[in-house]
Structures are given as C-alpha cells and as structure tokens.
Amino acid sequence: MQSRKDMDPFNAIILAIFFPFVAALFVPFIEKGIKHRIGWFSAAIALISFILIGQVTHTVAEGHAIKQSITWLPSAGIEFGIYADGLSMMIGFIASGIGFIIMGYSNSYMSHKEDLPRYYKYLLLFMGSMIGMVFSSNLIQLFIFWELTSITSFMLIGYWRNKPASIYGATKSLLITVGGGLFMLAGFILLHSITGTFDIPTILQNPEIVQNLKVHPLFLITLILIVIGASAKSAQGPFYIWLPNAMEAPTPVSAFLHSATMVKAGIYLIARMHPIFSGTDAWFILVGGIGIFTMLLAGFLAFRQTDIKAILAYSTISQLAYMMTMYGYTSYHEPGIGVAAATFHLLNHAIFKACLFLVAGIVAHETATRDIRKLGGLRKEMPITFIIASIAALAMAGVPPLNGFLSKEMFYETSLEMGHILGGPFEVLIPAIAVMGGVFTFAYSIKLIDGIFLGKRQDHHLPQHVHEAPLTMLIPAAFLAVLVIFIGISPSTAVYYIIKPATAGILLEEVHLHVALWHGFTTSLMMTIATFLIGIAVYTKYDNIAAWQNRTNERIPWFSMNYVYDKIVDGAKSRAGDFAGCFQPGTIKTYINAMLLLFVILGTIPALMVAATLIPDNLNFNVPAYEVLILGLMIIAAIASAVLKKYLHAIIALSAVGYLVSLVFIYLKAPDLAMTQILVETLTTIIFLLVIVRVPQIFREKISRTTMAKDLVIASAVSLTVLILLLNATHEIVYPLESLSYYFVEKSLPLAGGHNIVNVIIVDFRGYDTLGEISVLCLAALGTYNLISSRGDKQ
Amino acid sequence: MTTLITKTVTKICIPLIILFSISLLLAGHNNPGGGFIGGVMFASVISLTYVVFGLKNVKSFFNPEWDKWFAFGLLLASMTAFAAIPFNHNFFRSAVELVHLPMFGEIELVSAALFDTGVYFVVIGSLLYIFKTLGEEK
C-alpha cells in the first residue's frame, strides 16, 4: 500500500460516486451480452467503488478531512463539492461494501427469469446516490442525492410491479421519505438564511457561525425541520410506518437499503448536524426524545410480527432509534456524550442486520415461506445457516463476545452518564429505559432463532426436506458473520480505522477511544446481565404479549399511525379528484376558451396601461400587390376552414392558411422561419388527418345561437388583441424596455461562435430553456402513447 | 394518395430530403437551419413514406423504435450540458474550437452542435413516435 502512490483523493471520491451511475446506464446493454451474469458485473462495480473509497482511508485516518469543490450555480451559492471525513468514509464503506456483498448474493437469490437489468440498474443507482450523499459538502447537493436514494428505494420496493402490496409499500415509502426530505430542504434553506452558506464544512469549521445559530430565533424551527427529514428517512417516531411495508422489496434490497444503508441516511444527517445543533436542550428533547420513544415502541411492536422480515423491520427501527438516542445524548458542557457509541453501533448494526436479512432470504428461498408460525426445526437441515443466524441474532441481542455486545455496553455507559448529568429521577429513568430497549431486542432476537431453527415444523405444507442454500448465498452471509465475531473479539482495527476518524469527524476534535471486550465489573455490565435475565423472563411471556397486542389492535383500530396514514392518503385522493373536477370539466372547448380569454386579458391590459393610442399613427398602407393577393387568399382560406361542413375540407383549408403564412415569411426574407412553418404545417396536417379518419366526417352537432354568439365574441376579442399587439410590437408601448435582440446580434459570434443568431439563441444562450422544451416534447410523446393505449384498455 | 407517381417521386425524394435534413442540422450554427428544423424535416420525410406506402408495409422492413431515438437525444443534450462541469466550468458552458483538416480546410467544432444533435434526435423521435402511435391505433 505504501509504496504505490495513492490516487488524488478528490478524483477517487468523484469516481466512486459516478462510476455506479455510469455503469447503471450500461447495464441493459451489457446484460444482452452476458445475460444473468450481470449481477457479477454490478458486484464488480460496487467493489471498484469500495476500493476507490479505500484510496482515501489513510489521509482521513490521519485526521485530514478532504474538501474540494467545483462551481455549479455560483449565483445561488451552490457548488458541487466533496467533503470526506471519517463519518462519510464509514458510511461510504458500508454502502459500497454491503452493496458488493448484496449484489453477489443476488446472483443466486434472484431468479434468472426476473427483469434483472432493472434490478441491478436501480441497485447501482441507489449505491451511487448513497455514496454521493455522504460525501456531499453542499446542503443542496446533499438534498439531491438524498431524494435520489428515496426514489431508487421506491423503484426497488415496487420491483414486483404486479403485487398490490409492493405498490402500496413503495408509495408509502416515497410519500413519507420524500415528504420528509422536503421538510429537510426547508430546514436547509433556513440554515442558509441564518448562516449565509450552504457549505457544510464552512459552517462546521466556524465556531462563530455555530454560536450565532444557537441563539438565533429561527434555531428551533430549523432544527425541527431537519429532524423531521431525518426521522422520516430513518423511520423514526411517527414516520416508522413505511419501513415494515417496504419489506415487500426483494430480500437483498431490504438487506441493503432498508437495514444497512438508506435508513442510515437520517442517522447520518443527525450525525452531520450534531456539531451544529447539539449541546442544546432542544437537541436532547427532539433527537433523544424521538429516539427513546421509537426504541421502546418499535421494540415492543416487534413481538406481534409473524413474518421474519417484519420482525427484522421493527428491529431495524428500534436499533436505529438506539443511534438516534445516543446522538441525542448531549449537554452544554459535553455535547457529544454518545457519539462514539452511536457511531460504533451504526457500523455494527449494518453488519449484523444485513447478515440477518441475508439469512431471512436464504430461509425464504429454501422453504418458500417467511412465516415464523410455520417454520421451525431447520437447524438439522441447514446447520450452516443456523450458525450464521445465531451469531447475527445474538450480536443483535448484545451477547458477548460479538460486536453488538460492545456497542450495547457503550450505550448503557452513555445512558448512565446522561442520566447522571440530568440528575434527579432521570438518573435512574434513562438507564432503565435503555435496559428496557435492550430487553425487547433480546426477546425478539431469541424469537428469531427459536422460531426458525429450533423446535419442530408447525406447518405440514412446507417441504419436508430442506437443503442448505447455494454457496453464493451462504458465503456473503458467512462473511458478515465472521466480521461480527472479528469486530467483537478484536475491535481495535475497526475502531482505529473507522470509528475513531468518524467520531472525530462528528466531534471535530481528536478523540481517544478505547474499546475492549472486558473492562471489569462495571455498572454497565450489571445492566447487561440484568437485560439478559429480564429478557429471558419476557421471552417466556412472548406469545401472551403478542396476543395482547393483537387484541388491542382489534379493539381500537384507529390507535395506529397506519390508520392515520391511510386516512390521509385516501382523503387526499378524493380531495384531489374534487379539486381537479372543478378545473377540468373534460371538454376541450372549455379549456380553449379559458386560455383565449386569459390571453385577451394579459395581452390588452399592459397595452391599455402604457399606450397613449392603441393604433399607432405611423402606419404604412403602402402594401405591394402580391402581398395583398396572399393576404386575400389567407382570408378566404381562413373563412373556408370555419364554414366548410366536412372535417377533411376544413383541415385542408386550415393548412392552406399555414402555407400562405410561410409565403409571407419568404417575402419578408426569413427563409428559416418559412421552412419551419412549411414543415410544421405539413406534419400537423398529417397528424390531424390521422386523428380525423376515426371520427364522423361531417359536423353533426347542432350549435345553438347563444353558443355561436359567445364564440363570436371570444374570437373577435382574440383577433382584436392580436391586432393591437402586432401594431404595437415594434413600438415602445408594449415593450417599454430596450429590445433584447441587439445583445444577441452583438454577442452571438464572439461568445458562441455562430452566425445564425436564432440557432445560437436556441442552443446556447437559451440552452437551458431548450433542454426543458425537448424534455416536454419527450413527455408529450409518451403522454400521447399513454392516452391512446389507456383508451384501448377501457373498451 | 398512393398513385404510382407519388410512389416514384417519394422514392427519389427520400434520400435527398434525408441528406438535406442532415445538412440543415450541420449548417445550423452559421446558416439557416438547426436541430429543430432538421429534425422536423427528417420526421416529415418518414411520415411521407408512412402515408404513401402505408404504415404496415413500411414497418415490415423499416421499423425503428422511435422512443429510443428521443431518449437518446435527451440523453445527448443533457450530457452536453453537464459536460462542462468536469472541466470546472458552469453548467451549459459551451466551447468553440477551430480545427484544420487536410481535405476540408478549416472546420469549426462547437459543443453546442452536439446539443443541437440531441435536439434533432428528440424532435425526430417524439414526432414519429406520436405519429406511429396515432397511426397504429385500431
């Protein structure tokens, strides 16, 4: 490692972010060549990203954060920047490392008949967004990547498009996480208005800015908005409801997104914002409070679940809440009490929970069920899976010598410390709550092992002889299980290279961490022993508690967040229907009338306000004969298009008007306009004809006199407006400002190197507009397709 | 519409119009033309063949997936817009380069021309996609 010159860290990170994005573009093409082996290709991409992030480990472990940026929207203070410190490194490693393991595992898990390109494409896109998010130095850039992870997660939860449950789950996660993200954006904007910058390192490294922020009147609302965003993403507090439904995704996706990485984004944001907001009462009450509440609630609700993945989902929520709680532990004098513990738990949880999900995938793959009531006794048939699962579940339960034990001990220690600082009843209450959370975790962890592997099979429909999973599924899970033991027994490597830099990155100071398996008979060890004892006691009542929860739920169904969510969403749908109904009665004529009237109003008001006379006095009536001829023909054609009885004739008359207009353009020396006019006219005529062959060829509708009069008024008003606008177009009445065209005439050649000003405006000066316009054109094409094909469905 | 005369004229016109459409695209930066008009020109010649020979007949030997064309065009256009960022310029910054080639003399290379090519493909793709969808409707 040392002999070779490392890559420029900035380039390495940029590549690590964009390599998955670019690779995702090529997935469908490569899949044509290598078929189902596309999974290995994607895994290789993840490995490359992992190695690229590894290139900066040394620099960051030595305590130098990497900070570099490229201008993006300088006028708005938005840059594309990279900020790599220990925290972003750690999550970057988790995202790419677990990504590699998951994509390798998926090779066996996903049937070759599935739509594999779509699956791996979104996995890669997700991975790129996740890496991009943690290395973002700009809040707006962070927000963009943040929402990208939500969107890719939506795509992956809804991977099985035909299952209503997965669509429901995908929609729910999208609404909650993206909605939360919008709150977060509002928080970022407030943060910008307080601090004057979107740049994270600038805020972090200026103690004055942070001091000012903490006494600013907008401090609390900013914090609340950001915490809402983080909680929605990490399924905390009332927002937890999306995660259990997200389990409809393929299991590797759940392992990757919904336990190890995406749900950690909220925790990441909390950690990132920690130095900015912590050390205040508001931080402890909001972050710590949500954490404690969610930890107990989700841990308790896990009892009721019967699906392995649902149990894991609730346990993920509760484990994330541990981290929230620990990051929330703060005091004025010692803002970062729980930071090291939380960061360590973040890493440990990513490993053991991903491993448990992989086991859940193996079990479901081999037995075709995930229902814990039906399963049992698999330990004889699947001994290796049993061992792996036990290691991971016991790590979650906090049993020594596994990694979960270490961070759980640290959790207890920090809880004691926080309780001590708060004093009074809290001195006992906070540690007691922590132990309670541990008890629930212990109970459902044991339930997982007991329900799947011990005892006897409960359902006779299940296959009698289950065999061990293929190696491609076992090895990833086994690898994670080995990591669980390795970090547990010898934590110093992980602590030195990952936890210490990450903690230093959050606290912005040197940290001295010593983590060891054995540190004497401390109070926290007593708490652990108490946890196990109470945990065993609770476990004997496990089924009773679950039954009680079910009964309560049946008795008071409205006492649940899901009920509230469903009511809101259904209500929003019907309200939206009513609202749209007001504005969209469905007849094209209404829309056109509305548009034309608006045009008349918007066109005449400014003219009336500015103009001295509506008809300028310098009009030139000296029109050549051929122009009179063309105009005469145009009038005849226009009248014909209105009075002709058959559609076909009317359309041809209408297109005659168009062609005559192009003639006028030619006389006015505008050849490109004339050409465009001719071509567009041709195409619209053809499209018109295509549509018209499907409707009756003659106007059958009887038009009443009042309608006719109304139409006449509207038509005359519109033509009068156009006349006024045209007459004044060259006058200063309508455009009191200086004409823009001089600028373009002057600058077209020197700035853009083109002589054709119209074209230069389209592709260069106003390129952004054009990009928007062609996007609209694409959407119009897709919209036409949808309209036509959905009409076919109904008949 | 499908008389022998129209058929023959169409056959002769197709290559000419396609060439003209490409020349409009390439000339666009300095002379009348550009991606939009070139694209519309291309779309109109294809629609002419659809009308003259019948959509079904044309589809049997020439049936590109137009949706891919506009997808490609949009991708190309947005990539050109983003391409300035890695070179540490603003989004959408364009570049001009004069190149000497032995046979052609001095040629002006503009990054905006690539963007225009994107527009060209979007226009062709979306127009013909709409066209085909309407024509195929039962």
Image: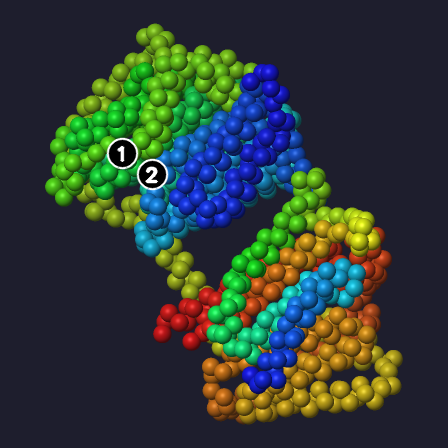
Disc number placed over residue A108 in the picture, else none? 2
For badge 1, the amino acid type reads Ala
Q: CA distance from mark 1 to mark 2?
A: 9 Å
Left or right, A176 with respect to A391, comes to right
Q: Residues within 10 Å of mark 1 (few under 14, many from 20)?
A: many
* Above/below status of A781 relative to A37: below
Q: Is residue A51 visible?
A: yes
**In the rendered view of the protein, which quadrant contains the C terminus of chain A?**
bottom left
The residue to which callout 1 is attached is A469
Residue situated in front as seen by the camera: A737 or B111: B111
Type of amino acid at the residue the image marks with label 2: Ser
Check contact, mark 1 vs mark 2: CB within 8 A. Answer: yes
Point out residue A51 in the picture as x, y percentages from the top left corner: 52, 28
Q: Chain of mark 1?
A: A
Q: Residue at x 58, y 16 (%)?
A: A2
Residue at (76, 87) in percent of width and height: A630
- Image location (x, y in percent) of residue A85: 56, 25
State which tag comes first along the sequence, 1 or 2: 2
Depth order, front residue of A24/B23? B23
The disc at residue A622 is none
